[in-house]
Amino acid sequence: MKRLLLILTLILLPLLAACGEETGGEPASKSAVRDFPAPQGRILTANQASNTISLIDVATDTTIGTVGTGAQPHHVVGTPDGKEFWVSLYGENRVQVFDAQTLKEIASVEVGASNDDLTFDPAGQRLYVSLGKSNAIAVVDVPARELIQTVKVGKVPHGVKVTPDGKRLLATNTADNTLSILSTQPELTPKSTVKTGANPFEVTVSDDSATAYVSNFLGDSIALIDLASEKVTGYIRSGKQPAMLAVQSGSPNIWVANTASAEVWVLDATTRKLVTRIPVGKGAHGIATTANGKIYVTNSTDNTLSVIDQAQTKVIATIPVGTNPNGLTFLPNPTGQ
């Protein structure tokens, strides 16, 4: 009898331990996502209609899991050190903070209104959040996890970006057809307003902080703005309804996701001409570059992510993600491996 009990115990112990992993502690599926090696980093997409963040392994271009969020995640951005990612919530008055390694929500910051886009300063000390319905920019002290300032800008601001030198914040005002230029030091202060094209949606900046590029969503063009003179120096024709855009570091090329034409256009900012057009999915919206030469594009209508090989300028993979993917970000490997 004793021998029989011993045998039964040895059989049952592993089963009980397995049950404990699923019910009493962290589910095995979650730990598998958390511990996935991702040596080349991950892409995170904000899936606005499914209240999730999709996690994509850059090395294999596969979805490795999802993280639940608050209502209507609009954009997701990693901190400069890659240790956290912050999520804007169009359906709530707060932003969420997640640990990049554990994938757990570690903080929540009230910003006073529904929020759209968000960007960090180069040091990761300040977060700037566009409050489209309030015509304002919220300033968050990142280490303290608290709102410290709210500054009025133009009507319905959306895209926000800090210049690489950290001296200016740029905000597109979609209903005013303007770009607000604000000084970040010693606190956020409005400096000037520049006319753009129709419905300026997003903004990015050259590596030397000299030129801003603004996508005119209803103007089918990219405005070039000299930040020293604070004047538009010209326009480059884009595809239909250009949304997010990215500068290719060390190159004059600008990569533009065009929503209505379902294409990415590569534009040369020096010659102001089209380099090539790359078909992607329907509702092309967000765009992000990575360290290994890949460009990722969210297709908001198709609920997919297109992967473009930068050198070949063609799509090499299409990845299913959540519903209505919007903003996205690249996160290097959290363990540094």
Image: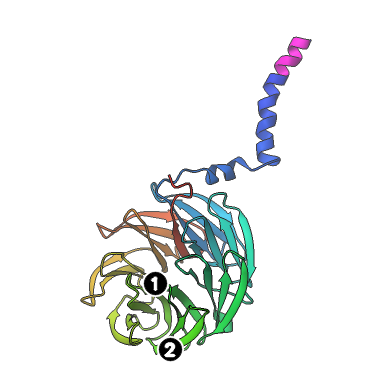
**Quadrant of the image containing the C terminus:** top left
Q: Where is residue 272 shown, x and y percent of the image?
A: 23, 77
Task: Please tell me which residue lies in front, 264 or 20.
Answer: 20
**Magenta span dominant secondary structure:** helix
In the image, residue 27 lies at what x, y percent? 63, 42
Which residue is outermost to the right? 1
Residue type beneath disc 2: Thr
Segment tinted magenta in the rendering: 2-8
User: For the residues marked 2 and 1, what is the alpha-carbon distance in whole angstroms?
Assistant: 20 Å
Residue depicted at 39% across the width and 72% down the height: 165
Estimate how packed mark 2 is, as few (under 14), some (14 to 19) or many (20 or more) residues with alpha carbons within 10 Å: some
Q: Amino acid at mark 1?
A: Asp
Q: Is residue 46 visible?
A: yes
The residue wearing badge 1 is: 165
* CB-based contact (under 8 Å), mark 2 and mark 1: no
**Residue 189's spot in the image, x, y percent?**
51, 84
Tell me the quarter of the image containing the N terminus: top right
Give the SS element for disc 1: loop
Mark nearer the N terminus (2 vs 1): 1
Magenta span includes 3? yes
- Residue drawn at point x = 47 percent, y = 69 percent: 121
**Residue highlighted by disc 2:** 193
